[in-house]
Amino acid sequence: MTEGLFQEVKKLLEIVEKYKKDVESLGSKREGLRSVNTHLELAIKESEEATKKIIDNILESTKIIQSLIKKISGINDNELKESLKEDMEKVLKILTESLTLLEFQDILSQRLLKISNFITDFEKEVLKILLLFGISEEKSEERKEELKEKLEELEWKKEVSQEDVDDILKQFGM
């Protein structure tokens, strides 16, 4: 039974390693799941910045249109005045709707953050399984204590560094 568990963990780690190699092509300098998190965090940041800029542009355009609507009242040609006012009110309405549609950015950021957290948690759980397996199989009490310390350290960390991942995998010859 223990051998089967070890084989399953090994398969899972092979999948993660394959994934790490695929992710390297994304151009990140760091390997593995951390690279995916880096790209997700960058996507969140860039979409927030772009959205803020779009909102600023819409608000500025709205102010200009409102100012133009006020200036239109000075035009003597009533037909032209009404036509211009209607067109500007349509543009104002479109800008307001566009502003409302930008709510997607907050939803997108929340989803990307959830994915990022999932990836971090997944990586941590795989390492815990590996450590627990190592503790159960290890004959040396000293080595068991080292693995237990690593496991306890892993439990308290919010994020696992690439150095931690590499260190744990080296202990198991991976």
Image: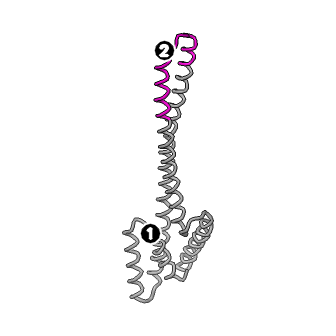
Query: Which label is found at residue 74?
Result: 2
Above or below for 121 versus 154:
above
Above or below for 57 versus 151:
above
Residue 40 placement (x, y as % from top left): 52, 57
The quadrant the C terminus occupies is bottom right
The quadrant the N terminus occupies is bottom right
Picture quarter containing residue 94?
top right
Q: Are the residues tagged 1 and 2 within 8 Å (C-beta)?
A: no
Question: Which residues make up the magenta segment?
Answer: 58-85
Q: Amino acid at mark 2?
A: Gly
Task: Pick the residue in front: 6 or 143.
Answer: 143
Q: Looking at the image, which residue is at 49% across and 75% down?
A: 130
Q: Amino acid at mark 1?
A: Val
Q: Looking at the image, which residue is at 55% across and 27% down?
A: 91
Number of numbered discs: 2
Residue 171 placement (x, y as % from top left): 49, 82
Q: Main secondary structure of the magenta part?
A: helix
Q: Which residue is mark 1?
A: 160
Q: Looking at the image, which residue is at 45% across and 88% down?
A: 139
Residue 137 placement (x, y as % from top left): 47, 83
Q: Looking at the image, which residue is at 53% across and 34% down?
A: 98
Indicate whether residue 56 is drawn in magenta: no
Whole-number angstrom distance, CA of label 1 to CA of label 2: 66 Å
Picture quarter containing residue 128?
bottom left
**Badge 2 density bin: few <14, some 14–19, many ≥20, Cα 10 Å:** few
Indicate whether residue 79 is drawn in magenta: yes
Task: Pick the residue in front: 27 or 10.
Answer: 27
Task: Pick the residue in front: 97 or 89.
Answer: 89
Above or below for 111 versus 140:
above
Horizontal side of residue 174 vs 60, given as left or right: right
Q: Earlier in the sequence, mark 1 or mark 2?
A: 2
Render colour scheme: one colour
